[in-house]
Amino acid sequence: MQKLLRWSAMPMAALLLLTACQGGGASTSPSASGSTSASQDPTAVCAADKFGCVEVAKGDKIELASALSITGATASLGLDSVTGIQVAIKDRGKVAGHDVELKSEDAGCSNAADGQTAAQAIVADPKIVAVIGTSCSRTAVPAMPVLAAQGYLMISPSNTAPSLTDPTSKDFGGPFYMRTAYNDKVQGAAVAKFACEVLHAKSAATIHDGSPYAQQLQQVFADDFKAQCAGTITAQEAIHIGDKDFHPVLSTIGSPDMLFFPIFDPEAPLITQQSQDIPALAKTKLVSADGASDDTFIKTAGPLAQRLGMYFSGPDLNFGTKYTGQFLPEYKQIAGKDPTSVYHAHAYDAANIIFDGIEKVGLTDAAGNLFIPRTALKDYARGEKDYKGLTGTLTCDPNGDCGASFVHITQLKPDASGKLTFQQVYTTRSGG
Amino acid sequence: MRATDVRLRLPQRFNLVSAILWGLRIVVVVLVLAGAWATLSSGKLSPDTWRDLVVFGIAQGSVYALIALGYTLVYGVLFMINFAHGDVFMTGAMTAFFVARNFDESGFLNANPIVALLILFAVSMLTSMVVAIALERIAYRPLRRAPRLVPLITAIGASLFISNSVRGIYGEQDQAYPTINALQGRFDIFGIPILKTQAVVIVAAVVFMVGLVYFVERTRTGRAMRAVSEDKDVAALMGINVDRIIVTTFAIGGALAGAAGILYALVFNEVDWFMGFLPGIKAFTAAVLGGIGNIAGAMLGGLTLGVLESVGPFLLLGGAGVPSPNQLRDVIAFTVLVLVLIFRPNGILGQSEPGS
């Protein structure tokens, strides 16, 4: 019925347009039916935009996609971000007069091809305005070329690998990629600082899983640990995702003061457990990172990690009163539980940047149809400056790094109700 | 005269191929020796660490061996590769998980660890056995007279069906197996410290293997099994119920896989619906390595593969300056498979394939 009304309105609008201005050459497509402002004619803007416009008919919903890890061992990571987006949608209400609908694709984590599959599913739907994803840096690498070729903006709430925003790297995300998470150059340096200043570690070993995230994070850490603390790196080992037996690798890394393994579930909890079987590692402090800071880890190795006083690095979640007073209660209401990981607020900010962009660059014609030019949306988001987000004040650098997060180190401790949670013991944030 | 022609031509072809194979042999031996020498002379690892690596390898290899026995038994009687066997292994461990969790929550697990463990073994072995029997009855028996490719593809389909059914029934999260306090820590056996869980794995695996050998060599059913393996038609003429023997074979293979599932869960404290895939492939490798169809070969192949995986990466690559050698353990495992297939297609203890 709505469609019928729209179509019948078109000849009338075209007539109006013809009488209003004489240059009617461009009004051949139906979308050229009418513009409210003389300077911002959707037809002209959309024709000028390299990737055209997303058209949202009056009364239709704006489609936003997520490409996160929502199944398997790393699901707590991605579902946590999905809830962050849902809170943003609920908070925002209408965007440019339209409701927003979230389409969740599964971009996985451990298998890079899943990122490409999700990206292909997204570009197959021309109604999707922008994408929030991916959870893991590895899946962002193959997803980005697919999305960028069709002009889809992707904002990641949790990719942290430095190569994604490094123009000299083959993994570089390109102009349509940006992230609200920090760059691991920040996290790696923070862990190195913590290692020498708080743990007083003289030697360290690292284990990664071959993913860009883990591989680069441990490398940044190793470089900074050597440079800043004059520490020695006894081994930089790697494991194969899907393996269960890590006794051999743990036997061959020597006896360092600290072991840094910024990897995911289920490998991170397994390494935590199996490290206890190696006598040489009896005094080694275990440190993992944001990729393993989730419910799945607590379920599989939480009590052991608590007993060992294991550390985890990640984004400092002291975002202020709006976060604790407003965001978290809404999160609990939607998800029915506490956050399962640490990148929900970053996803909230990513969604709001997209909503702001839609309101800023979107054009509504006389019939109430919304046109969102893709390149203009990307330019708006990538040019974000002093944006007051939930996670802090965000300013994008020319390569797409927009995260303002501070890094903290947590340990697993029981909260008031006796449930194990990640509780901060160290932070790089100055003045709380 | 024609016979001499053939004799003249054959050595020429043989020489070319064998020269390449000999070259490959020499390259492999040189690489292995050079890598091992570089590692050992660098002295990066103490002898104690090497000993620990071997023990870890034997424990992992025992699990492979138990699963490999299932492949080998089925191959012995049906000459087919039951690729769903890894998933039979998974169903036992997954089902027993729920029993283990209940035992853990009620405190029974740590109050009576031995009884609890025996019940867990029983549940896991029974589940895997039932799944294996159903598999044979539903997926393989109707295809017994079909070309050999057909059951192979059916097996892959059955594997997907079983793993995804478990995913649907039990969920796709990783489940954390409860730990048994009595099995924490290590034993000192002849001065060699060994983890209690790994000791249990090795001992249990030895018990099951000895039991199997006794069953096959000494019992009536075992003799019937060997007869079916030799020749089904003649065995049937001798009054052996071939169908029953085949079901028995699947049941025994399934029970061993179920036992392996519990041992695996004891060591790694984690089970999920996909856990059967990699161990299944590795156990298949072990079965081929030892000589498929040969029971002692499966055991030997499993242990060899386990130790190779544990010691190999560091021994062969560590000294050569390859970064992060442990990432390449699967590469080493499957390279060994390829080399075995090239140089000894019948495996270490294998006999030549019947009918060929």
Image: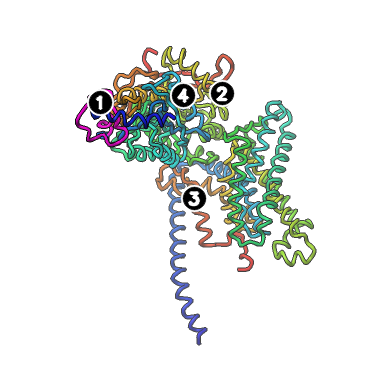
Contact between marks 2 and 1 (CB within 8 A): the answer is no
**Rendered image: mark on residue B332:** 3
Dot 4: chain letter? A
Q: Are marks 3 and 2 on the same chain?
A: no
Label 2 and label 1: CA atoms lie apart by: 63 Å
Give x and y (percent) for residue A193. Answer: 38, 23
Residue A368: which quarter of the image?
Answer: top left
- The numbered mark, 2 or 1, whose residue comes first in the sequence reads 1
Q: Are marks 4 and 3 on the same chain?
A: no
- The numbered mark, 2 or 4, whose residue comes first in the sequence reads 4
- Res B134 seen here: yes
Of badges 2 and 1, the one in the foreground is 1
A24 falls in the magenta region = yes
Give x and y (percent) for residue B145. Answer: 66, 62
Q: In the image, A15: left or right of B84? A: left
Amino acid at dot 3: Ile
Q: What's the magenta region?
A: A20-46
Up the image or down, A160 lies above or below B316; here it is above
**Rendered image: mark on residue A40:** 1
Of badges 3 and 1, the one in the foreground is 1
Label 3 and label 1: CA atoms lie apart by: 64 Å
Instruction: Name the residue carrying label 4.
Output: A86
